[in-house]
Each structure stands twice: as C-alpha cells, then as structure tokens.
Image: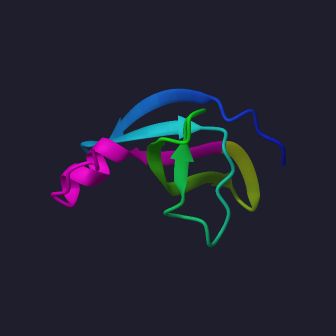
Amino acid sequence: MATKEIVSSNRTYEGQTFIQSDVSINPGNSGGPRLDENGAVLGVAVSRYRIGDAPTGLNLFIPISAALDALALKPAS
C-alpha cells in the first residue's frame, strides 16, 4: 500500500490525543516513529483502523510530547 504520509487529523479519544495519518502501520511496527521532513520524531505508532481484515488507510500515533510527558522525560537538547 502506498501512502502520502498525510496527517489528516488530530483526535482525542478517552482523554488521549492522537495524530491520524495515512502512514501504514503493520503488525510488528507499533511503537515506530512518525517523522517529519527533517527527521524529527512527531509521534509514536499505536494503532491502525481496520474493517474486518481490510485496512482503511487511517492510522494513529501518540504525539511525541504526550509520550514524553507520560514517561516523565524531557526531549534531548
């Protein structure tokens, strides 16, 4: 599946913010980074939408700032 790496929405579900994108997430690559054009991490892959066995092309990433906050970490300088 080819993607354009488009961020299509920012969503909040049960108090957690997510970045929605068409970037593919497949079994085994949850936790992988969502990068910007300069290689900076924007988010961490957590979930993909599927209808039955069919991918929808919509996938969710936790914003890196939320992930760092949850782990009580600060970004490297």
Is residue 48 on the magenta stretch? Answer: no
Report the span colored magenta.
Answer: 58-77
Q: Is residue 21 above or below residue 72?
A: above
Kindly identify the residue that appears in the image at 66 percent across and 44 percent down. 23
Q: Residue at x 52, y 53 (%)?
A: 33
In reply to whether residue 63 is colored magenta, the answer given is yes
State whether residue 26 is above or below residue 1. below
Residue 61 appears left or right of 26: left
Q: Is residue 64 left or right of residue 51?
A: left
How far across and down, in percent of the image, does residue 18 sit? 41, 41
- Total of numbered circles in the picture? 0
Residue 68 sits above or below residue 35 on the image: below
Quadrant of the rendering where the C terminus is positioned:
top left
In the displayed image of the protein, which residue is found farthest to the left?
Answer: 72
Q: Nearer the viewer, residue 4 or 20?
A: 4
What residue is shown at x 58% (from left), y 46% (from top)?
59
- Residue 14's spot in the image, x, y percent? 28, 46
**Residue 30, percent from left and from top:** 54, 64
In the image, residue 64 lies at what x, y percent? 36, 46
The outermost residue toward the right is 1
Q: What is the image's colouring?
A: rainbow
Residue under the point 71% across and 59% down: 52
In this picture, residue 65 sits left or right of residue 53: left
